[in-house]
Image (tube, grey):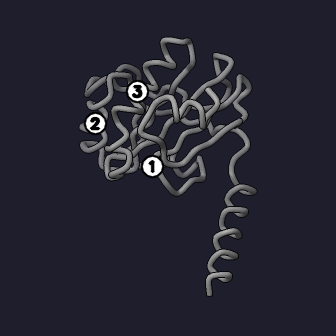
Amino acid sequence: MKKLLVAGLCLVLVGYWMNRPKDMPVGFLDRYEGERRIDKASMVGGVCSTDRCLTIYVAPWCPYCTQLTPVIDQMARDLQSEGVSVALIVGSDSLGKVKAYAKKYSVPVYEDANGDYYRSIGVTAVPYFAVTNASGKIVETMLGGYTSVASMRQELGI
């Protein structure tokens, strides 16, 4: 029974790895700072304006995302101050919950309440982190996270 379970898990992981997107999908999302909309329909994903970009996807209903909010916020601030482009996306919940959760971050966030961009990424769990190069190719991903900024940056190679 254990061997069957391990084999099934391996098949799922191999299937995910083989079917994951090679390029970060492009989407147009509203950008907020707190509850105030900064831009309507800003582009997320695709070609990166810096050497490396980080896309982070979190959801209000995710207890692990909530637990990691301070760490994710600190990492996003640190990377932005170092000139790394960061797209923090809050989504897959009602617009009211997305906006309320977005207020917990000190950096601007993108809103994807209907989850369209989340589905285009092709993952089924949050928090999700993707590091892309300047041409938009995904070079590193991570599901879940760590309770320290240093550990997360080491895992993501940024």
Q: CA distance from mark 3 to mark 1?
A: 15 Å
SS for dot 3:
strand
| Residue type at tag 2 | Lys
Give the mark nearest the N terminus, 3 or 1: 3
User: What residue would you read off at disc 1?
Assistant: 115
Percent position of residue 58, x then y: 42, 43
The 10 Å Cα crowd at callout 2, few under 14, some 14 to 19, many 20 or more, is many
The residue sitting at 68% across, 18% down in the picture is 51
| Residue type at tag 1 | Gly
Horizontal side, residue 72 vs residue 18: left or right: left
SS for dot 1:
loop
Percent position of residue 18, x then y: 75, 57
| Residue type at tag 3 | Arg
User: What residue would you read off at disc 3?
Assistant: 31
Horizontal side, residue 96 vs residue 19: left or right: left
Number of numbered discs overlaid on the protein picture = 3
Residue 39 in the image: above or below residue 81: below
The 10 Å Cα crowd at callout 1, few under 14, some 14 to 19, many 20 or more, is some
The circle drawn on residue 99 is: 2
Percent position of residue 75, x then y: 45, 26
Q: Quadrant of the C terminus?
A: top right
Q: Residue furthest bottom?
A: 1
